[in-house]
Amino acid sequence: MTNEWDEYAPEWDKDPSVKEYALKVLSELNNKILLEELTILDFGCGTGNLTQLLSPNAKHIVALDGSREMIKLLEEKELDNVSTISDFLCDELINDHPYLNQKFDLIIASSVCSFLPDYEATLGQLKSLLTSGGLFIQFDWLAQDEGSSMGLTKQRVQQCLETHEFKQTTIELPFTMTSSKGSMDVIMACGTNI
């Protein structure tokens, strides 16, 4: 099955802002958690720019994206400790896919949650994949109000983390991305599965 993100895949890695975003996310992750030897789920990994940056230190990464074309480009990077899944997260996939039979120390969702059809349900599914004490971290575009077609509000993110009983939650605005179209703040949310 193809999706709208497949058409972006061939040009994705050529956009310097994609790499800039991944580097900024990595910097924030390094400020939050020691990444060495963790099992990581990179949810919505795209072509794997962040996956590639995480790979040298991670024990193992499962990179999941609904775009087959994006996953193909990640696979071409031939990262030894990365396993890929080209599919959409759902209960059936969690129950049946061998790469998801494990629990993860860290789940990263970078610039993906605001595009999900059901953010709240997906966050519950992701939490089920965390170890006890595991950390969920998301990066998304900040929306100023719930009516916005792009991004998530701080309130919605906080409410969703609370609904799914994440502990030690934090929400920050760690950086801004600027392009010829303007500037957009990035929201970073963290929660621990306790």
Image (cartoon, rainbow, N blue to C red):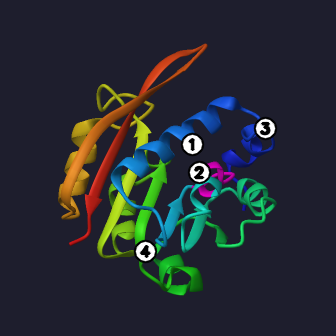
The residue wearing badge 1 is: 22
Asked if labels 1 and 2 touch by Cβ distance under 8 angstroms, the answer is yes
Q: Is residue 64 left or right of residue 121?
A: right
Write down the region rendered in magenta: 45-51
Asked if labels 4 and 2 touch by Cβ distance under 8 angstroms, the answer is no
* Tag shown at residue 104: 4
Q: Quadrant of the N terminus?
A: bottom right
> Whole-percent x and y of residue 63?
60, 65
Question: Is disc 1 surrounded by few (<14), some (14 to 19) or many (20+) residues within 10 Å?
Answer: many
Residue 50 falls within the magenta-colored stretch: yes
Q: Which of the two discs, 3 and 4, labels the residue nearer the N terminus?
A: 3
Q: Is residue 137 left or right of residue 57?
A: left
The residue wearing badge 3 is: 11
Q: Which of the two discs, 1 and 4, labels the residue nearer the N terminus?
A: 1
Q: CA distance from mark 1 to mark 4?
A: 21 Å
Q: CA distance from mark 2 to mark 1?
A: 5 Å
For label 3, the SS is helix
Q: Residue at x 28, y 46 (%)?
A: 157
The residue wearing badge 2 is: 50
